[in-house]
Image: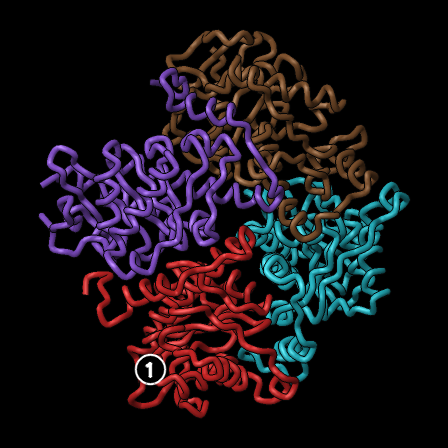
Chain colours: A brown, B purple, C cyan, D red
Amino acid sequence: MLENLKAEVCQANLDLVTYGLVIFTWGNVSAIDRQSGLVVIKPSGVAYDGMNPSQMVVVDLDGNVVEGNLRPSSDTPTHLELYKSFPEIGGIVHTHSTFATAWAQAGLDLPIVGTTHADYFANTIPCTRDMTEAEVKGAYEKETGSVIIDTFQSRGLNPVHIPGVLVKNHAPFTWGKDAHDAVHNSVVIEQVAKMTCMSKMLNPAMTMNPHLVTKHFERKHGQNAYYGQK
Amino acid sequence: MLENLKAEVCQANLDLVTYGLVIFTWGNVSAIDRQSGLVVIKPSGVAYDGMNPSQMVVVDLDGNVVEGNLRPSSDTPTHLELYKSFPEIGGIVHTHSTFATAWAQAGLDLPIVGTTHADYFANTIPCTRDMTEAEVKGAYEKETGSVIIDTFQSRGLNPVHIPGVLVKNHAPFTWGKDAHDAVHNSVVIEQVAKMTCMSKMLNPAMTMNPHLVTKHFERKHGQNAYYGQK
Amino acid sequence: MLENLKAEVCQANLDLVTYGLVIFTWGNVSAIDRQSGLVVIKPSGVAYDGMNPSQMVVVDLDGNVVEGNLRPSSDTPTHLELYKSFPEIGGIVHTHSTFATAWAQAGLDLPIVGTTHADYFANTIPCTRDMTEAEVKGAYEKETGSVIIDTFQSRGLNPVHIPGVLVKNHAPFTWGKDAHDAVHNSVVIEQVAKMTCMSKMLNPAMTMNPHLVTKHFERKHGQNAYYGQK
Amino acid sequence: MLENLKAEVCQANLDLVTYGLVIFTWGNVSAIDRQSGLVVIKPSGVAYDGMNPSQMVVVDLDGNVVEGNLRPSSDTPTHLELYKSFPEIGGIVHTHSTFATAWAQAGLDLPIVGTTHADYFANTIPCTRDMTEAEVKGAYEKETGSVIIDTFQSRGLNPVHIPGVLVKNHAPFTWGKDAHDAVHNSVVIEQVAKMTCMSKMLNPAMTMNPHLVTKHFERKHGQNAYYGQK
């Protein structure tokens, strides 16, 4: 079942190691088959070394395991909430990468101050609000998804234009049109988080003009995009 | 004697190099066989390159060498104090890893501000008090152990829930159920020390809600833990 | 056509990866053949892995593609402006290397406070001014070149003595007598940007005497240079 | 002539690359044969890749080339001054390693706040004073040596107990009983510079008790040293 998607998701999980974004079991990637509404995700707490596609777990959007001998990632309910609310996305990545996590721990939005950021994210990357005691003690991982969605809705943000978020006191989630694209965005958010951490120390008052942000985002993602070979 | 444990301890010492936590001879791992009360530890000042299990030194809890041609780590008395006072632990690691040592040199507790931290340590990781001149000029390494134990007792901390400490102006010690687990915790403390160093520079007023800390620690270590495949 | 130059430019692009200055497609190198007035440059959005000389694009100084099946780097007009205004230079590099970009995002000149800097750059490395909305919405990449040139002219800087610049909210450009030399300077600017970032955090009031700057620059680049084997 | 010493010095130069302390030609190692008063040193501006012992240059203490086809390091007169004034030392290293250079650029002493530092350096590592215009325009490299020596003499420091220095606005020099030992100290100074840079950002008021400093230095280097296997 979904053999290609399982191979893709497995490879995307391994890519997190290659890019230096995870150690131990600190990350997970999923992808969705929109036709069947089934999601393929990394098993919980399994090491990356020796991981293979047959270990991937298939779940439906209610979280029922449809195929697989292992338990799915404990973060599965967060992924499912995002797939349900963000219909354009096909893959999701969660890591505890160093600098993006540093911003999440600081409880700060990652401000847009450079074209590296604007090439992929059309604006500041939001940091979610504190979760309430009820949310944490309840369906915690599902509520984590709800808080992300609430952040995007209440701020009027488009998840296609801002394909990632910092969960306060936790770490980043990123997404994309597929698992590979979501991993790409997780590399970008870490690199931008590192550069902007240093920029903030050098000049806390740094700013960027909105017209430069728009130019770079549109150059790659707009109607008249002209970056690359397409 | 204790051939399996010597192999484990040797491998755990070599893992410190693989994880980038030590250079030269700046670290040591030990493990205890609780049945016999014997401790296996790295020899003092011996390079990691080419290290093998037969070089490990076996000592009793009074520090007498029971087997081995080399002198045990100069930090052996610190390890022994911890084994005597913390009966649940089976392995201990000492490194001078960069960011954990930076916090120890700063003389600051490593505050809990993220789930990465809370997944392994149930609260802030304490930094010990200054050692007195008498303690330093006396049985220094043994007194180092006593100061660690005193820190946990006077603050009412459980060493199983907080498997590590920062020794002021020195560096971290971590422990765990065995040598492998103690090494795992030494990787975690370094990674958390790095992330939280950056978070503190971004926002010195950062905080984390206690219910989120508890949730993450319990998710992995509580009665109803549901992380992983167990 | 220009087979040697295409090989050189291809290799220089690959060197950016080796030196850790680029990920994905975040950088480009070009070189000019001053006799024919033709420029060889990396194709736009093409991955470094597997890149070969035949993929390099040849353009004239008006930006017309003279040879090549791929579209040239979207930054080509910036390169062309620099070649037209700085007749002594033979190669140009653009990267988003971490620390140089951090200074560019901070909108700050990279101050000269060390001999590492002075060995290659005779003074502070300038950061350009904000680009106007008209410049950004117009011929953006060409205007980026104009702003760089304007920075050097208005400040009375010699691009041979200061072979690089920080484009505000963007990233560094460096140049040199050929592509290899320009790559060398892109390594230097990143290394100096990192060291001076740390120096600024340690001592925001740091300074360097002008006579020491002059000594080091002249020791390597002056009439009576005596560094090396020449 | 001095074939063993040439092999040692060549290897020590290559070790700088292995330890990540130098890029390009940014460093040099020398060693002295105290019997003959001859010094073996790296040639100036020669790349490390492919370097071999036959390229090492032999000079006397007046700087005359006694053997070798290449020009000696431009920093040779600095090395010679140190050998003449510090009779106990046998090897010298100069690098532009990142964090040690950051402190030198900041113009600050590297304060002693940890046992990692105290295991090798018995006190704060001094940063030299500004060089005068006359010193810089005169016999610059020789004067650099004089300023180092003056720093140790005027502060009453023992170069055997503090085997390194930060030259203001320049970078570190370290030394030791031979070239290998000097390289070891150059690794230590860089690692300590990095840790203490982070410590200072976390707590600018950090301090360390003198009795702890003495204990650690003496444990390794004192009359009754008991670290290691000796």
- Near-viewer residue (D195 or B61): B61
Q: Is residue C188 visible?
A: no
Q: Point out residue A145 in the picture as x, y percentages from the top left corner.
A: 59, 18
The answer to whether residue C37 is left or right of residue C3 is right
The residue that appears at 57% across and 28% down in the rendered structure is A180
- Near-viewer residue (A226 or D153): D153
The answer to whether residue A34 is left or right of residue A1 is right
Relative to B25, does residue D49 appear above or below in the rendering?
below
Q: Secondary structure at mark 1?
A: loop
The answer to whether residue C11 is left or right of residue B230 is right
The answer to whether residue B187 is left or right of residue A145 is left
Relative to C190, does residue D170 appear above or below in the rendering?
below
Q: Which residue is mark 1?
A: D88
- Near-viewer residue (A164 or C230): A164
Q: Point out residue A152 in the picture as x, y percentages from the top left corner.
A: 70, 22
Q: Point out residue C229 in the picture as x, y percentages from the top left corner.
A: 53, 79
Q: Label 1: few (<14), some or many (≥20) within 10 Å?
A: some
Q: Residue furthest right?
A: C134
Quadrant holding the N terminus of chain C: bottom right
Q: Point out residue D147 in the picture as x, y percentages from the top left corner.
A: 52, 83
Q: Is residue C207 visible?
A: yes
The residue that appears at 42% across and 46% down in the rendered structure is B127
Relative to A120, does residue D78 appear above or below in the rendering?
below
Give the total of numbered labels.
Answer: 1
Relative to A207, does residue C125 appear above or below in the rendering?
below
Question: Image quadrant of residue D140?
Answer: bottom right
Check the residue under mark 1 and report the chain it is in. D
Quadrant holding the C terminus of chain C: bottom right
- Near-viewer residue (A179 or D170): D170
Question: Image quadrant of residue C68?
Answer: top right
The residue that appears at 55% across and 56% down in the rendered structure is D204
Q: Amino acid at mark 1?
A: Glu
